């Protein structure tokens, strides 16, 4: 009987220890929300891949909208598609995944900042979290600008009125993933005004590698 009790106690400690180990690095939990999976996203994928997928849809339809600057109906139709991919609360129906670039990018920034603030977060996490959050914040700001421009296009009464606004919308939409070389130094960094989702992915990969989670 004593043997069984001892075995049970050891087993209990082992199971408890395993639970503690699984939760010993809360920074990794938030990193997983960014990269691997998050409740409520399409197919439960991570916030960052969701943002990238939605941004690619938005950029594609922005390009289609700009293809014929003399056709107001086509410009407005594709602009609605862009807005749906940016934030489905602005346009209910469209070809996007139904989550939106803006909410996904905002979620990336929020959860990577939570990772950096978590107890025991490493220097690699806190350093690269700044890079990821800044790049994601740029995407949120670009999303806001796209929504502003998109609403102007939808309110336009002539193709000529919409065309110049659409030119800027398309330019901003094409920056969502690759970012832009704002300071003209020949490279696109993660910094404010430059980085996009591509830079967020790069620094997320560096963070994961440093933490032994794979790139």
Image: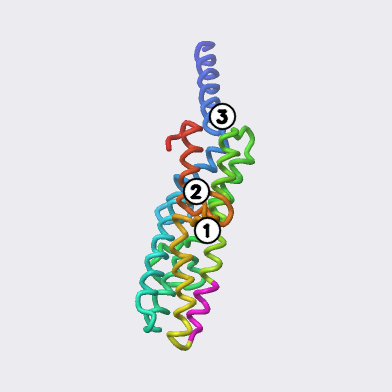
The residue indicated by pointer 3 is 20
Q: Which mark is residue 200?
A: 2
Residue drawn at (57%, 37%), measured in percent from left and top?
A: 125
Q: In the rendered view, would you say 36 is above or below 104?
A: above
- Crowding at mark 2 (Cα within 10 Å: few <14, some 14-19, many 20+): many
Q: Is residue 62 one of those drawn in magenta?
A: no
Q: In the rendered view, would you say 209 is above or below 193?
A: above
Q: Is residue 151 one of those drawn in magenta?
A: yes
Magenta residues, start to end: 148-156
Q: Which mark is residue 139?
A: 1
Name the N-terminal-most of marks 3 and 2: 3
Task: Indicate the secondary structure of the residue bearing disc 3.
Answer: helix
Residue closest to the eye, 27 or 56 = 56
- Crowding at mark 3 (Cα within 10 Å: few <14, some 14-19, many 20+): few
Task: Indicate the secondary structure of the residue bearing disc 1.
Answer: helix
- Give the residue at the far bottom of this rendering: 157
Q: Which mark is residue 46?
A: none
State left or right for residue 138 relative to residue 52: right
Residue closest to the eye, 39 or 129 = 129
Residue 7, given in percent of the width and then of the height, sits at 50, 16
- Which quadrant, please, contains the C terminus? top left
Name the N-terminal-most of marks 2 and 1: 1
Residue 43, given in percent of the width and then of the height, sits at 40, 53
- Crowding at mark 1 (Cα within 10 Å: few <14, some 14-19, many 20+): many
For the residues labelled 2 and 1, say whether their Cβ atoms are less than 8 Å apart.
yes
């Amino acid at each position: 009987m004593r043997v069984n009790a001892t075995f049970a106690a050891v087993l209990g400690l082992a199971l408890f220890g395993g639970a503690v180990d699984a939760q010993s690095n809360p920074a990794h939990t938030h990193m997983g929300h960014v990269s691997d999976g998050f409740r409520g996203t399409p197919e439960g994928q991570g916030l960052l891949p969701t943002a990238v997928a939605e941004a690619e849809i938005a950029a594609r339809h922005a390009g289609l909208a700009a293809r014929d600057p003399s056709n107001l109906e086509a410009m407005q139709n594709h602009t609605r598609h862009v807005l749906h991919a940016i934030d489905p609360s602005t346009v209910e129906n469209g070809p996007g995944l139904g989550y939106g670039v803006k909410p996904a990018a905002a979620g990336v920034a929020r959860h990577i900042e939570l990772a950096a603030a978590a107890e025991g977060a490493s220097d690699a996490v806190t350093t690269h979290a700044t890079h990821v959050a800044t790049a994601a914040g740029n995407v949120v700001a670009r999303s806001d600008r796209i929504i502003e421009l998109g609403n102007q296009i939808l309110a336009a009464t002539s193709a000529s009125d919409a065309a110049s606004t659409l030119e800027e919308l398309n330019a901003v939409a094409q920056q969502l993933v690759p970012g832009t070389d704002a300071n003209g130094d020949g490279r696109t960094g993660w910094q404010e005004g430059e980085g996009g989702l591509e830079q967020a992915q790069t620094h997320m990969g560096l963070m994961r590698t440093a933490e032994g989670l794979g790139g």
